[in-house]
Amino acid sequence: MSTFQREFSHDGERLRLAGEHLSGERYRVHVGDRALDVEARELPDGRVRFWWDGRVFEAASAVVGKLLQVRVAGHTWSLLPAQGRGASAGEAGGVVEAPMTGTIATVDVAVGDAVSKGDVLVVLTAMKMEHRLVAGIDGTIAELRAEVGATVDQGTVLVRIEAGAAGA
């Protein structure tokens, strides 16, 4: 069972989502203290249609600068950087996670490679866009869980970097 957790912001308001894939198109999503059973389906144009409490919503997302923005019901939410994660979700950290479900297009590193903060490690394609996942710290690739062509879920750890000077 895959899980996900993200924190979004809109006009100073924060929204924390955590969820788990139950089966097929069914998910249990936790928003604050509320647990919601949701059905969701990705549409051919990259948007997501979901059903909750008898209502239908559509969500679209785009990467703007370094932020993932999601638009639902006329409101745009920005993904907040997460502490201790790689640049896929923020700037600092030795763990790089998939920012969304997608397919690994390229893997530009191998275990043992020295990397510098900002180096491209993996390119993920999702929602008809390329997402360049970069090192959040200088160090050495300690673990690599990304394979070209593999489909990964949002939040999947793809790379772990052991901190230290690149090339040391």
Image (cartoon, rainbow, N blue to C red):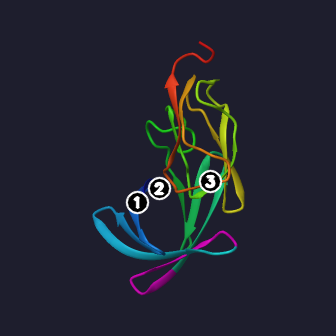
Describe the element under mark 3 as helix, strand or loop: loop
Front-lying residue, 130 or 14: 130
Front-lying residue, 112 or 84: 112
Front-lying residue, 71 or 144: 144
Q: Mark 1 or mark 2: which is in front?
A: 1
Amino acid at dot 1: Leu
> Mark 1 to mark 2: distance in Å?
8 Å
Give the number of marks.
3
Question: Label 1 neighbourhood size at 10 Å, few (<14), some (14-19), many (20+)?
Answer: some
Residue 12 showing in the rendered view:
no
How far from the left and from the top, in percent, is residue 143? Answer: 52, 33
Q: Is 96 situated above or below 100?
A: above
Describe the element under mark 2 as helix, strand or loop: strand
The residue under label 3 is: 150
Assign the N terminus to one quadrant of the image. bottom left
The residue under label 2 is: 8
Q: Work out whether mark 1 precedes mark 2 in sequence or the reverse, and give the earlier one.
A: 2
Q: Tell me the number on the disc at residue 63.
A: none
Q: Is 55 situated above or below 161?
A: below
Q: Give the residue drawn at x 59%, y 24%.
A: 112
Q: Work out whether mark 2 precedes mark 3 in sequence or the reverse, and give the earlier one.
A: 2
| Stretch of the chain drawn in magenta | 45-56
Residue 46 belongs to magenta span: yes
Q: Work out whether mark 3 precedes mark 1 in sequence or the reverse, and give the earlier one.
A: 1
Residue 47 belongs to magenta span: yes
> Mark 2 to mark 3: distance in Å?
27 Å
Q: Give the residue drawn at x 39%, y 63%.
A: 20
Q: Check contact, mark 1 vs mark 2: CB within 8 A.
A: yes
In the picture, measured across the screen, residue 6 lies left or right of residue 64, that is left
Q: Tell me the number on the disc at residue 17.
A: 1
Amino acid at dot 3: Ala
> Mark 3 to mark 1: distance in Å?
25 Å
